[in-house]
Image: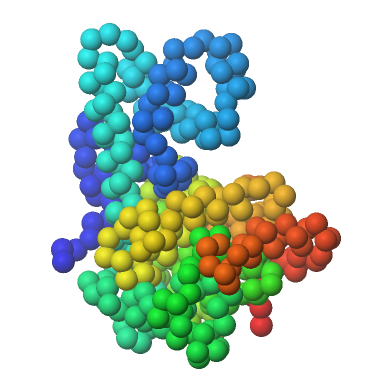
Amino acid sequence: MPAEREHHEDDESPSSSRLMINSRQLTRTCNMYWSANSVIKQAKLWCRKNPAQREAFEAQLTDEEKQTLALVKLLIRLDPEVVEELARRGRGSRVFSDHTETLLSKGQSNAKAEDMRKCRNLLGKWLVSNPPLDPEDSSTRGMNNPTTAYLLASLEVDWDDEDERRKFMAGDFEISEMQFPRLCYPGGKGDKDRPWIGAFLGELLIKGGRAILLSPAASTSGTPGMNIGGARGHRRTTKTRGPIGLAKRYDMTEITVPFIAYVTVVVRHCLTSDKEYSDEGSGFDYELFYTEICKYLQDAKYEQITSKVLEHWNKEIFGQAGNRKAGRGVRTAGRGTRALLDAALEAGEDLGLGDGDGGGVAS
């Protein structure tokens, strides 16, 4: 397999492919599953209105439409000329719109493919596994490997129970998109009764985030391979430097919730035995999974949870805390993390977060 290129395809693209570059940014940092067609339609409407009309237009939008408008505004900032061209009527406008949609969609698909491939190739450096992980051999991942199977399991699966572990790896348990898998937790360990503790603080997610946003080297330097079930890896001791890689290109100094959800989807896919990514890989609805993560981390009720997660990611990726605020099977029905957290909040229970780095993990 040829050596992987560090986003050089972006750097060396001619100006005509600028849209695909910007589309990658929207996909990674704003919405993994955005619709190019919806963005183009709303961009046309937005650019044809005066400031007063825009205010009234925005006020009547649904939450989903407001998310699309946020993408439009970012695209305007990144490439105002092409958005203005979309708003023009007349000869050739339809052809231009169709061509623009094609480029945006292609950029979206390319971002996913590039990052899935990159993280899959790095997985063997991130995890200590027996058998070793081979990026070219899907049989070394997924339910074929106890290490990757463990990380794909939810906290509801009792991994210490040999019979339950065997049944899970045999595919006898249905995996719910409403539950967060062990890959989201430090060392893969968490409390099934309070699954919000430690969620999205997992080392594997941070490594994925560094690989995508900074560089592959940043995902492996300063930290040994992750040994599931063993001690947590050492923190980096190197001095923080300025942004590199895509973080520099995107002028990004703080992590967004959609980026965390994006990384989680990428890492989960890389742990499976699926050779290629699809939105419903092996019956798992990745878009539903992504949406559930975003809802969880963007819900105002959970601000104390989200602030700790963002603080952790900003510290691990950028070296500073930042200032952002933020079931299908019988076994898992009604046991989603948000449902459990809502019940705890309603009952006024101590969430067990403490004042540390996000509550840690269960012992």
Residue found at the far right of this picture: 348
Q: Quadrant of the C terminus?
A: bottom right
- In the figure, is residue 316 to the left or right of 15? right
Q: Quadrant of residue 105?
A: top left
Question: Up-down: is 43 above or below 172?
Answer: above
- In the figure, is residue 278 to the left or right of 343? left
Question: Up-down: is 177 above or below 247?
Answer: below
Nearest the viewer among 173 and 233 is 173
Residue found at the far left of this picture: 2
Nearest the viewer among 345 and 186 is 345
Residue 343 seen in the current view:
yes
Question: Up-down: is 174 above or below 343?
Answer: below
Image point 65% across, 75% down: which residue? Answer: 191
Nearest the viewer among 284 and 129 is 284
Image point 73% across, 57% down: which residue? Answer: 342
Q: Quadrant of the N terminus?
A: bottom left
Question: Up-down: is 195 above or below 290?
Answer: below
Q: Position of residue 109 (x, y in %)?
A: 30, 46
Q: Position of residue 171 (x, y in %)?
A: 41, 76
Image point 21% across, 43% down: which residue? Answer: 12
Q: Position of residue 76 (x, y in %)?
A: 42, 26
Residue 238 seen in the current view:
no
- In the figure, is residue 92 to the left or right of 268? left
Residue found at the far bottom of this picture: 162
Q: Position of residue 152 (x, y in %)?
A: 46, 72
Image point 36% across, 81% down: which residue? Answer: 145
